[in-house]
Image (tube, helix red, strand yellow):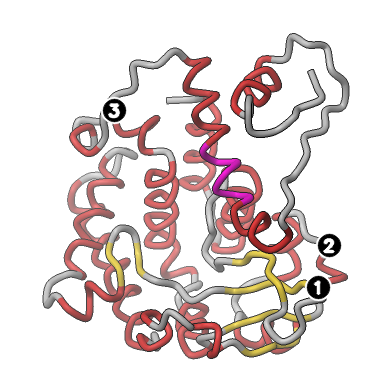
Amino acid sequence: IPADLMQVLDEIQNASTVDELMMVDAKLVRDYGLSGFLLVSPDTDPFDPTRRVLRISQVQGILNTSFTQMRDRRFAVDSVKEDAAVILSTRGYDKETADQIGTELAQIAINVYSKTNMDIAEDPMAFKFDKIYTKDQVKDIFSNVDIDAYLTTIGYDASKVNEFVLCDEAQLRALNACYTEENLNALKASEFGDVYGMYSRYIAPHYAELASGVGRSYLSEHDQAIAEVSSVFSAETRMRKRNWGKILFLHGVYASGSCVPAVALREAFDGRATVLTP
């Protein structure tokens, strides 16, 4: 498993408070491409396309279980408990502890689902539920979260963020109610699950409990790097390209021509974009 992934997994496990875990979560949004607990992302103001705002999206599920599945399948929430227990077992938790924490996360899933507006979740024109909220209103909704610190850690200038777009306030209030110290271990399990889900191809092959869920890559590390950069960059810029018709450009501090990541970036976009350096 790559050392940087192991380090961030250790940071999740070692977080001693919900505030610490939130800062790790923000780091995962910033550096690892995760959506994060709050699903914060830049977006166009739906009421004024000349303005940009931050959107806090509706949560669609917990771990691999969607709220739609919880509605339609009687015992779907059991999968939350089972998935969490398996993940925690790979982190050294004994079965009894892992099962207990999995049960706590399943209860969080039930609590959040119970306040979720499923009309929003399933409406292809869900933007009609959008509403503008001031920062003070968002802070009131997320009273258990230091919103400014969270945004700053992600990389936003919190002093310039004054408005947000939300669509399901009741759900977000239920989510906020879960961010308490008594739920710390369950929140860690959720965070582990998000990292494992994003980077399963690097993590799962090393654990018997997870190995069957992902195939082992036989590409060289160089080719894996190219594939990863191409996939992630495409996903991260899809919305921007749709909104603006432009693509982000790459800029290096200096170009020696021998930087392995920079070379991988250049090769990943060969034929699709002109990379000036290296």
Dot 2 corresponds to which residue?
157
Residue flagged by tag 2: what amino acid is it?
Asp
Residue 132 is marked as none
Dot 1 corresponds to which residue?
161
Residue flagged by tag 3: what amino acid is it?
Pro
Q: Residue furthest front?
A: 271
Residue 152: image quadrant is bottom right
Residue flagged by tag 1: what amino acid is it?
Val
Q: What element carries label 1?
A: loop
The magenta-colored residue range is 231-237
Q: Quadrant of the C terminus?
A: top right
Q: What element carries label 2?
A: loop
Dot 3 corresponds to which residue?
205
State the residue in front, 220 or 178: 220
Residue 94: image quadrant is top left
Dots 2 and 1: beta carbons under 8 Å?
A: yes
Q: Classify mark 1: residues with Cα within 10 Å, few (<14), some (14-19) or many (20+).
A: some
Q: Which residue is drawn at 60% across and 41% down?
A: 233
User: Is 77 positioned to the left or the right of 181 in the image?
Assistant: left
Q: Does the magenta stretch include residue 232?
A: yes
**Residue 114 x/y as whole percent:** 32, 87
Gap in angstroms between the C-alphas marked 1 and 3: 41 Å
Magenta span main SS: helix
Mark found first going from the N terminus, 1 or 3: 1
Q: Residue at x 48, y 32 (%)?
A: 6
Placement of 248 over or under 129, stated as above or below: above
**Residue 162 x/y as whole percent:** 81, 79
